[in-house]
Every structure is written in C-alpha cells, then in structure tokens.
Amino acid sequence: MKLLSRMLAAAAAATLGAVASVTMLSGPALAATYSTGHIDILDLDYEGTALSLNAKTYAGVTPVTDDLSPSGNVFRVLSSWTTTVPSGSSWSCLGPAGSTMYVLPQDYDAAKLYPGWNTEDVASAQGPVKLELVSATSNPPGGRFTLYTTVKSGLVVVPTFRLNSNTAAGCNLPVWPGGISAGGHGHSNFAFSQLGTYTVTFKATAQNGSGATTGNVVYTFQVG
C-alpha cells in the first residue's frame, strides 16, 4: 500500500508539474518590459505571401527571438534618458528649442535599450516597404512620438525625420519617406515628448510583388 501511495503521489506531482509548465508558457506570463539590450523594435519579415511586423531580440535579451510579438510587451524609456531640443529650424519638428524629449538612442549605450528596424528577411522583390505611423496616443494625453535619425556634418548634427506625430505645420509625418529598402538593418532615435504610457500603431506594406500588408500593429512604450 505504501508503494502504491508513493506511485500515486509521484504521478500527481508530475501532472501538476506539466500543468504548471503549460501555464508559464502561455498568456500573460510571457509579457515583459524591455529597457536594455539590442532590440529591432520594428522587425519586418516576409514569408510565403505574408508580411509580418514584430520585434527581434539579440544575445543578452531574453528571449532571443526573431518573432517577439509587441502584444503584451512593453518597451521602456527611463525618465533620465533625456535630450534637450537644439535651436535651429532643422530641429523645430522635434519640439520647441530647449524643451525636453525622452529618447531611446540611435547610438549604442549598454545601459539603455538600443532600438532598431530590420528588413533583412524581406526579399528584394517585395521592397521597398511602406511604413506608416497610423496613430500615437499617450496617457496622460498630449504626448508626441518622433522617430528620427542623425548624422554629423562636420561638427553639426543634422536630423532626418522618419515618422512624426507632431501636428505643427509641416511636421506631421505619417509615412516613412521613400519607404525602407528590403534587406536592411539600422537604428533610429525613438523620442517622446512627455512622461506616460504611449500606444503607437504602425502598419507596413510590401510595395512590390504581392503588396502584402501587416495590418495595424500596436506597440506600448512606457516613458518614466
């Protein structure tokens, strides 16, 4: 009887263990907040006839995956990750000169999330990819989202705006100009105008070949 009891107990424990494993691998348990490491936040993949938009993580980020769903996951910008908007007309669409922006930087910093975009898994026949900023809202309201790159021209830093929710005259930029070439990988500044939670919706379309679209894909950014 003692042997039978031990066998039944072991079987019950194994069953509970199996159930626990399934629970931990499904649903909200997978949700995570990412604030460090190399992550291509806008990762585009074309497979078969389908175009998908998700995130790609690299070594040092758990999990390492080419298909991290934005749903349920949060990309965080700490309140100390700030930049002051320079003076000059080239910067005016980022915000008023002297104002503060909270930024995930284009340049690598081991202490911060290193955000990128990626079309390496999009066949050249499908590109360029049209990337749209469908909407960007914040809680509390009023926050702006800007995606831009910078280059140095001598001692001067020059911005190029790729997507911008700024509604000021001449600043709103809902479509990445010229599209993103297939087979590429790069990094940009992801900037936010105030603390809060941002819901940012993107949509991508393969402009040649099948014309496949991702539909609307929603990302969550926590600033602060």
Image (tube, grey):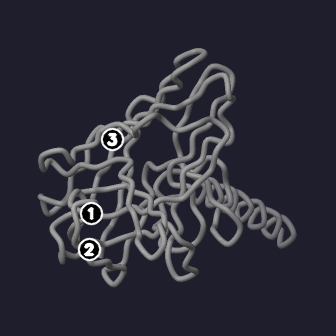
- What residue is disc 1 on? 91
The residue type indicated by label 1 comes to Trp
Q: Residue furthest top?
A: 210
Mark earlier in primary sequence (3, 1)? 1
In whole angstroms, how far apart are the C-alphas of marks 3 and 1? 20 Å
The residue type indicated by label 2 comes to Pro
Q: Nearer the viewer, mark 3 or mark 1?
A: 1
Q: Quadrant of residue 160 in the image?
A: bottom left
Expressed as whole percent of the image width and height from the top left, the position of residue 18 reads 69, 56
Q: Image height check: is 194 above or below 67?
A: below
The residue type indicated by label 3 comes to Leu
- Report helix, strand or loop for mark 2: loop
93 vs 182, left or right, is: left
Mark earlier in primary sequence (1, 2)? 2
In whole angstroms, how far apart are the C-alphas of marks 3 and 2? 24 Å
Measuring 74% from the left and 67% from the top, which residue is drawn there? Answer: 9
218 vs 206, left or right, is: left
- What residue is disc 3 on? 133
Q: Do the residues bearing badges 1 and 2 touch, measured as CB atoms within 8 Å?
A: yes
Q: Nearer the viewer, mark 3 or mark 2?
A: 2
Q: Residues within 10 Å of mark 3 (few under 14, many from 20)?
A: many
Q: Quadrant of residue 74 in the image?
A: bottom left
Measuring 18% from the left and 77% from the top, which residue is drawn there? Answer: 98
104 vs 135, left or right, is: right
Q: Residues within 10 Å of mark 2 (few under 14, many from 20)?
A: some
- Quadrant assignment for the N terminus: bottom right
Mark earlier in primary sequence (3, 2)? 2
Q: Residue furthest right?
A: 3
Expressed as whole percent of the image width and height from the top left, the position of residue 93 reads 22, 56
- Quadrant assignment for the C terminus: bottom left
- What residue is disc 2 on? 86
